[in-house]
Amino acid sequence: MSYPDFFDTIETIKVKDPLSQVLGVFVAGEYEFSYLDVVKAAGHSCPTVAGAYLIASEALKALYSEGRAIRGGMKVEFKESLEEGVAGVIGNVISQITGATDKSGFKGLQGQFARHSLMKFNADISSSARFTRVDSGKSVDVFYNPETVKPNPKMMPLMQKMGSGNVSAGEIKEFGELWQERVERIFENRTTVIEVSEV
């Protein structure tokens, strides 16, 4: 399997999942997500998928500064509707990492470990997303702005050529490389594109 080298340089997100421990999946319920994991689930790598990964990563660090984040132990809210823009894509990535879902998730085991109803859209917030610990009620807002990392100017002409169907294999390859180069720069500038504040 071949993919951009920078994927392997991105910090993983470490979680503790009590459900997985009870069901005998991971020792102590501890495992981690890589950017490659979410790319495989999403089927692509783009500023939106990268942003969702960064949003989750930075929010979980802020909420669980004492150690691993508890998967299934937080609520996530978005100001957009599920159908609006890229909210669904972002929601899917964050759901994979946090375990939070709207109505489709796990209903629980003997009254514990439920994952459904932990994700809400159309929330009355101003941030890109709000994460709230179920146990303590502590919340953080996360703001994501990828516009500070501009795409290479060569990308638009190449995209237009692809739209017309008059594009060579070499140009398609160049477009993909330029696309991922921007994603890499977004990760390199994570402190610029992401802001976290406690609610």
Image (cartoon, rainbow, N blue to C red):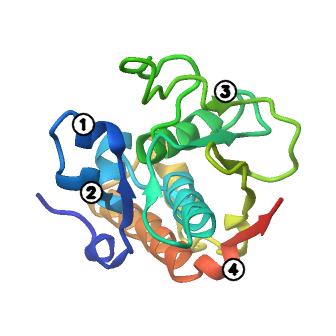
Marks 4/3: CA–CA distance: 26 Å
Locate residue 106 relative to residue 36 in the image: left or right.
Answer: right
First in residue order: circle 2 vs circle 1: 1
Q: Earlier in the sequence, mark 4 or mark 3?
A: 3
Identify the amino acid type marked 3: Leu
Q: Is residue 17 above or below residue 145?
A: above
Q: Is residue 34 left or right of residue 151?
A: left
**Going from the N terminus, do you reach mark 4 or mark 2 first?**
2
For marks 2 and 1, give the one nearer the viewer: 1
Q: Which mark is residue 53?
A: none
User: What's the residue type where badge 1 is placed?
Assistant: Val
Task: Residue 7: tell me if it is visible.
Answer: yes
Q: Give the distance between the C-alpha atoms of the residues marked 2 and 3, in whole angstroms.
A: 28 Å
Near-viewer residue (171 or 152): 152
* Residue with the mark numbered 1: 22
Residue at 32% of width from left, 76% of height from top?
6
